[in-house]
Image: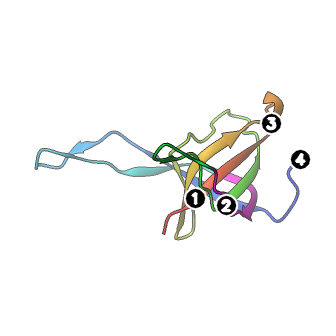
């Protein structure tokens, strides 16, 4: 069980692109699912490997494992009002499907 003040984040998932008339595509996002959990500040920055940052997150989100198995993917976005967070990492401790720990980076 996840304990603490609950916050609701909304998963935004991109839908297939539509032709923009100029040779490209325009993608739109839809609100796919609302998750309730605990959002905590975090200042994690992991090591650089070559010229890549392995992980740099600003927040952690602890949530119950969804009953419908609809979990966010790395790279997707969660919103809280006007704030947007990118999912950088997902952990399912001991693969027990009881709760998830998400590493998030807030878009500036």
Residue 93's tag is 3
Which residue is rendered at x = 71% and y = 63% of the image?
42
Q: Earlier in the sequence, mark 4 or mark 3?
A: 4
Residue 97's tag is none
Residue 94 image point, x, y percent: 83, 31
Which residue is rendered at x = 79% and y = 29% of the image?
95
Above or below, 106 relative to 76: below
Which residue is rendered at x = 63% and y = 62% of the image?
58
Residue, disc 1: 105
Q: Earlier in the sequence, mark 1 or mark 4?
A: 4
Report helix, strand or loop for mark 2.
strand
Which residue is rendered at x = 56% and y = 69% of the image?
81
Residue 6 image point, x, y percent: 78, 62
Give the extent of the magenta segment: 35-46
Report helix, strand or loop for mark 1.
strand
Residue, disc 2: 59
């Amino acid at each position: 069980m996840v304990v603490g003040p609950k916050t609701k984040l909304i998963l935004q998932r991109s839908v297939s692109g539509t032709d923009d008339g100029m040779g490209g595509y325009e993608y739109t996002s839809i609100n796919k699912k609302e998750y309730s959990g605990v959002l905590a500040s975090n200042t994690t920055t992991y090591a650089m490997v070559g010229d890549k940052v392995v992980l740099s997150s600003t927040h952690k989100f602890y949530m119950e494992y969804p009953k419908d198995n609809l979990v966010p993917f790395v790279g997707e976005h969660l919103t809280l009002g006007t704030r947007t967070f990118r999912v950088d990492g997902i952990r399912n401790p001991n693969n027990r499907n009881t709760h998830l720990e998400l590493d998030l980076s807030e878009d500036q």
